[in-house]
Amino acid sequence: MAEPITIAPTTRHEGHAKLVLNVDDDGIVTKAFYPNTTPVRGFETMLQGKPAAFGPIAVMRICGICQATHGIASCEAIENAIGAEIPQDGAILRELLGLGNRMHSHPLHHLLIVDDLLKPEEADTLRIDGIKLIQKMRKEGQLIVDIVGGEGIHPPNLVIGGMRNNITERAKSKLYYACKEYQEDARQMYDLIKMLTERYLDEIGIPDLGRHDLPYIATDTTFGNRDNLKLDDIAELTAQNYYSNYPEIAQTATNQIPLYLGTPAEGGPRARMVKFGSFRTDGGVMDVNLARALENLGAVERSLQLLEELNIEGATKITPEYKDGFGVGVHEAPRATNTHMAEMGADGRIKNYRIIAASTWNMPVVEKAIEGYHHKYAEVIMRAYDI
């Protein structure tokens, strides 16, 4: 048995983590660990006793990439706790906001994986053209967040009770044309990712690289649906419990591990396409990259549909009336299912708060996907999950 291999920190992905790999004499990974190393910030404890309005404002600071999804899940949880129903046009704008976030986030991750798939001689040609396309898509997706959310970072229009403001006819038209541009760009991006992933697998001769037999978890294709999530089926373990037989890992990991029916489960683009489509379940990790590129197309098509449905004269917000209650908010973040749970008081303050962040679903999945393959592919497999 060879010495364990440690890659710390891992790079070109959304979060902060490290890989610890036990390998045999042939370099095959026999056991993989992928602990999160982000410092504990204590958002759940921070929210206890705070006014409800502080909830979405605070949790949008959890992640600099997917701030909108945390804000949406928080609003949905608090509204569910107090029995509030937001206006239809507020719901449309809220879904648009989340889709804009996805349409920005997915291309950003294409940027992070591209060096795994390109050949060195393509650095000055295909790489540059691909990056230009990615940056154009990011700008178009971010425009939705800017206009619908009121600001690109930590969108202030997202509030408990709906969306603070509707958009103008001019803004709606601007978004429509941006989405039509994105639609064509997303087709080009899908073709590029498909070509690169297929070529990569042909060259390494491992068509099922990163394959695992774990289940999938998803609640919706473009927004989130608490009715498709049974909390009784989910358990969260501390890293100290999950890695109890590996104290060196347990002492450094800062994330909790969610389990679905007692086992890790994959969330994110492929999971959504498996649960709500006909995407294959027996493929390797490159299917995650391919599914992400496909979701760009699905997201922009849904955005165009929502723009058609939006009444710019419609109400977008109600004034919430607080009461004691417990609620669940679910949003399909770019990376996986994002779940917030809020216990509210009649005084409008948060009694208790829990978060199952999207990225935490795929941390243990990455470990399983790496095992059985040569360690030189570990970071390629890890990066496919965008966590």
Image (spheres, grey):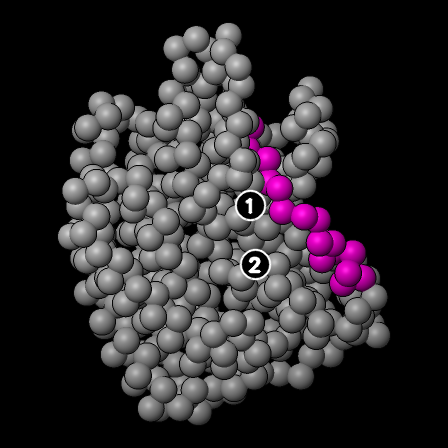
Give the prevailing secondary structure in the magenta stretch. loop
Q: Residue at x 52, y 83 (%)?
A: 316
* Magenta stretch, residue numbers: 33-48
Query: Which residue position holds label 1?
Result: 16
Q: Amino acid at mark 2?
A: Cys
Query: Which residue position holds label 2?
Result: 63
Q: Residue at x 43, y 87 (%)?
A: 167
Q: Nearer the viewer, residue 96 or 286?
A: 286
Q: Quadrant of residue 119?
A: top left
Above or below — where is 363 with respect to 387? Answer: above
Q: Amino acid at mark 1?
A: His
Lower position in the chain sequence, tag 1 or tag 2: 1
User: Is residue 57 something that shows in the picture?
Assistant: yes
Q: Quadrant of residue 211?
A: top left
Q: Tell me: 357 left or right of 177.
A: right
Above or below — where is 280 with respect to 356? Answer: above
Residue 206 drawn in magenta: no
Residue 39 drawn in magenta: yes
Do tag 1 and tag 2 residues touch (Cβ < 8 Å)?
A: no
Q: Residue at x 61, y 76 (%)?
A: 159
Measured as percent of width and height from the top left, residue 185 is found at 22, 63
Q: In the image, which is nearer the foreground, mark 1 or mark 2? A: 1
Q: Tell me: 48 left or right of 240.
A: right
Q: How many marks?
A: 2
Distance Cα–Cα, label 1 vs label 2: 11 Å
Q: Residue at x 38, y 63 (%)?
A: 104
Measured as percent of width and height from the top left, residue 355 is found at 66, 52
Find numbered disc 1 in the image and state the secondary structure of the residue it sits on.
Answer: loop
The tag on residue 153 is none
Q: How many residues crowd around disc 1 within 10 Å: few (fewer than 14), some, or many (20 or more)?
A: some
